Image (tube, rainbow, N blue to C red):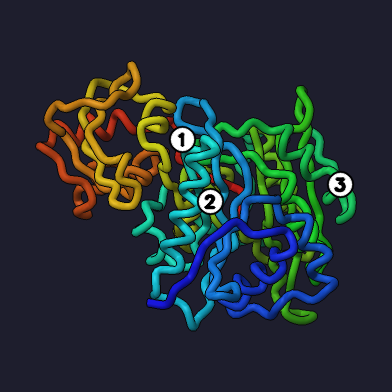
């Protein structure tokens, strides 16, 4: 193993670190023009680098907060730009970077972290688990018809590209983050979103829905086709809503856009009933289901006490080999959570606990996959109820 050190990056090292990340994903290094657009996205003092002696790996985060089951929120580290140079992989570099980042989170009182994984096999060993999943939907726009009894909804107004960029933060902040896993958007994220939509090869539109109380939803989309005469696809880039009228009204708008053959929307909440808007639900087909948010309980005692539970009582034993202070037994109930020495009803590794925590998985299903060890069926039934949530978790923000 080669010798290397890990430290907080200086602001003048952010571009080099970004290029290390881009090379790890097989993307060309930044140009001066690109860096001018990317630099505002770098939150100061949130990047770590591994040096040997030059920069060989990096990880960064953005300050946020995440909605928990029960509606409470806690500070969140939104982890991004993770990469190790290809000639230094599998030598403990990423492990050291992750450990330094977790230590920083702990020092700053950040009890949870979330990321979007480029590869599914990397992050489980650091305690991250797939807490939120999303489905990709394709709607046959030529054949799909709304159910006639659906309300026509509120008022729709259309924004062009520059108006979209200007109004995006206020539109997003106007909507409540009600699903477990939804996060606040750092001001450092918006410049990156603006850069991406400005790079789009077709016009970017945003439809805003207003109900009796004001803005209650918006959808951003483009329409693309390979060449003139080829089928055209309306691609949903972002879709947020807080009322049934906004949900239906925005989908009604998407179906009204002319010269469109198909509509696609990726990584939508698993329980979002798009197909039930249509007279024939088969005209909205689920193409795939995939991981949408990877979650990590950095401070297990704090996080277990921060969410609400349903039903009776359960003792859960947690094994966290990466952050050993989290390991131990905890009694969970509607009254909260506390450490205990009582015998465990359920035993899990911390990555599995991170999957259970937001309510996206049932303990009994994870037990069937060998990820939960239970004292009996009764324990699994109690765990299913305790961790259950009214709606599926969903992050809805890429970072």
Circle 3 sits on which residue? Answer: 166
Circle 2 sits on which residue? Answer: 280
Mark 3 and mark 1 lie on one chain; the one further toward the N terminus is: 3
Proximity of marks 2 and 1: CB atoms separated by less than 8 Å: no
| Residue drawn where x is 55% and y is 38% of the image | 108
| Residue drawn where x is 14% and y is 40% of the image | 374
- SS category of the residue bearing label 2: loop
Of marks 2 and 1, the one in the foreground: 1
Q: Quadrant of residue 315?
A: top left
| Left or right, 19 with reference to 171 | left
The total of numbered circles placed on residues is 3
Above or below: residue 315 compared with residue 252: above
Above or below: residue 73 compared with residue 356: above
Q: Is residue 205 visible?
A: yes
The CA distance from mark 3 to mark 1 is: 31 Å
Mark 3 and mark 2 lie on one chain; the one further toward the N terminus is: 3
Q: Quadrant of the C terminus?
A: bottom right
Q: Picture coordinates of residue 344 (x, y %)?
A: 15, 33
Q: Picture coordinates of residue 143 (x, y %)?
A: 62, 59
| Residue drawn where x is 45% and y is 47% of the image | 295
Nearest the eye: 96 or 207 = 96
Proximity of marks 3 and 2: CB atoms separated by less than 8 Å: no
Of marks 3 and 1, the one in the foreground: 3
Q: Is residue 66 visible?
A: no
- SS category of the residue bearing label 1: loop
Circle 1 sits on which residue? Answer: 391
């Amino acid at each position: 193993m080669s010798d290397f050190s890990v430290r907080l990056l200086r602001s003048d090292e952010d571009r080099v670190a970004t290029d290390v990340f881009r090379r790890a994903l097989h993307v060309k290094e930044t140009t001066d023009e690109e860096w001018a657009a990317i630099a505002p996205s770098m939150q100061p003092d949130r990047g770590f680098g591994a040096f040997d002696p030059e920069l060989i790996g990096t990880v960064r985060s953005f300050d946020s907060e995440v909605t928990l089951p029960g509606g409470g929120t806690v500070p969140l580290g939104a982890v991004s730009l993770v990469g190790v140079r290809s000639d230094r992989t599998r030598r403990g570099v990423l492990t050291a970077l992750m450990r330094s980042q977790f230590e920083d989170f702990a020092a700053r009182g950040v009890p949870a972290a979330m990321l979007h994984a480029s590869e599914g096999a990397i992050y489980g060993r650091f305690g991250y688990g797939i807490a939120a999943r999303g489905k990709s939907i394709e709607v046959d726009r030529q054949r799909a018809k709304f159910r006639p009894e659906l309300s026509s909804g509120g008022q729709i107004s259309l924004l062009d590209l520059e108006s979209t960029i200007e109004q995006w933060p206020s539109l997003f902040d106007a909507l409540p983050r009600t699903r477990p896993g939804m996060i606040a958007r750092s001001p450092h994220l918006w410049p990156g979103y603006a850069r991406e939509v400005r790079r789009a090869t077709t016009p970017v539109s945003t439809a805003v829905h207003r109900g009796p109380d004001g803005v209650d939803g918006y959808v951003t989309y483009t329409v693309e086709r390979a060449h003139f005469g080829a089928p055209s696809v309306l691609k949903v880039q972002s879709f947020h809503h807080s009322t049934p009228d906004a949900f239906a009204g925005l989908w009604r708008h998407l179906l009204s856009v002319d010269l469109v053959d198909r509509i696609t929307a990726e990584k939508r909440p698993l329980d979002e009933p798009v197909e039930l808007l249509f007279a024939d639900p088969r005209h909205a087909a689920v193409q795939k289901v995939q991981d949408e948010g990877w979650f990590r309980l950095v401070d297990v005692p704090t996080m277990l006490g921060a969410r609400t539970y349903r039903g009776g009582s359960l003792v859960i034993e947690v094994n966290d080999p990466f952050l050993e202070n989290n390991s131990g037994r905890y009694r969970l109930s509607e009254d909260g959570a506390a450490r205990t020495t009582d015998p465990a009803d359920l035993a899990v590794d911390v990555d599995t606990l991170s999957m259970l925590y937001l309510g996206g998985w049932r303990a009994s299903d994870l037990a069937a996959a060998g990820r939960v060890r239970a004292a009996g069926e009764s324990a699994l039934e109690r765990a299913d109820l305790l961790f259950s949530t009214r709606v599926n978790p969903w992050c809805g923000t890429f970072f």
